[in-house]
Amino acid sequence: MLVRAHRGNTLAAGVVVLTAFTVEAELRLDLGDGARFALTAGLALLAGLLGLGSPVQGDRPRTYQELLFAIATLAATGAAAHLSALLGSSLSSRPMAGTVAWVAGAGAICGLALARRRDATLALLLGTVLAIVALLAAAGAAWPGDDPLDGVRLMLVVVLVLLVGAILVRFDRRYRHAVVLADVLGVTVVLLSATFLVRADHRLADALGVVPGSGAAGTGWELLLLVCGFGLVGLGSAAREQGPGWLGAIGLVAALLVVSRGGGGLVGWPLALLLVGLVLVVVALRPVAREVPEDAEEAAGLEQAPAVAMPLRPVVLPPPDDEPR
């Protein structure tokens, strides 16, 4: 399916309008599961083919291509949900963890495949989040213990390790992908903190089928949450990326809420954080032997003299020989 580059924005606008029509048809019309599946699957196929048929320009997809791939991923997830209902398994039935796992897994496969094929960052974000949802639902469904949060928590740790490894591998070669995965890492830290905080609300714990409690965590869990929160804030500051920085700050606040559930007064984490903060402030304020430029570009500019532009002079061409003077 050939797509003209100069008509990409118009094409994406048309697909967005078709997406709005699909949503309205889902909400207003009394359609059967087969019709809903055909509608969402057709939208996913259309958006995916148009995105793949559009020309490659530069080293990254254009904005309209990112939008087409994102719509294809979300529509494929909806189509998987309607196919599940058509086959007799609904998201409103219990237990629904297995259904959530394979529906989210289908959407994750679509998003990650598009991200790998066309280097799409938004599809990578959606695909990674859907993959995490699928893994968490599968872990909660397959956990043999009484509390499914234990299985979810261990799966989140596995996800954290995989995300950190993927970020380290892609940071130099695919920087934009590394930033997106850092955003997902921040969301994962918030989810890991939520697995402890949800126990403190007994109504929410009963609704989710987990064992109520104080919301406190062990020292190892608290250390992991604090390290991830501070690490993401530091990564966002060093790389000058707002996404990992803000999500890391939210994860850090959630980690501090978990730490505060443990009690113990000043001794413990409050004292440790106070000492570490004072050490960092003292190190930053220590005298230095020479001034260091704040920016590498500024340091390079000190070594190179600025180029002087040559003045332009008009060039007067002689008239032709046959032209009267």
Image: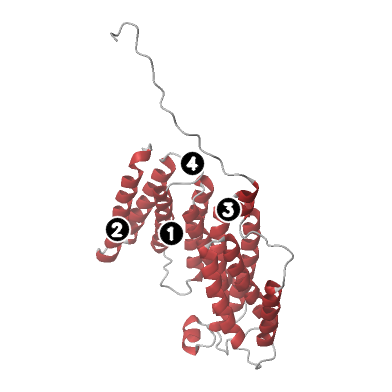
Q: Residues within 10 Å of mark 2 (few under 14, many from 20)?
A: few
Say what secondary structure mark 2 lies in.
Answer: helix
Say what secondary structure mark 4 lies in.
Answer: loop
The residues tagged by marks 1 and 3 sit, at their Cα atoms, a distance apart of 27 Å
Residue at figure coordinates x 36%, y 57% from the top left: 37
Q: Residue furthest top?
A: 322
Residue at figure coordinates x 54%, y 67% from the top left: 245
The residues tagged by marks 4 and 2 sit, at their Cα atoms, a distance apart of 30 Å
The residues tagged by marks 1 and 4 sit, at their Cα atoms, a distance apart of 29 Å
Is label 1 in contact with label 2 (beta carbons under 8 Å)? no
**Residue 58, which numbered label?**
4
Give the mark toward the camera: 4 or 2.
4
**Residue 112, which numbered label?**
none
Query: Is residue 147 at all visible to an observer of this figure?
Result: no
Q: Which residue is mark 1?
A: 77
Q: Which residue is mark 3?
A: 175
Q: Quadrant of residue 238?
A: bottom right
Where residue 252 appears, x then y in whole percent? 57, 76
The residues tagged by marks 2 and 3 sit, at their Cα atoms, a distance apart of 33 Å
Q: How is the protein colored in the picture? A: secondary structure
Residue at figure coordinates x 70%, y 77% from the top left: 282
Relative vertical location of residue 265 with respect to residue 48 in this rendering, above or below: below
Is label 3 in contact with label 4 (beta carbons under 8 Å)? no
Q: Which residue is mark 2?
A: 20
* Side of 304 relative to 98 (left or right): right
Relative vertical location of residue 92 with respect to residue 217 in this rendering, above or below: above
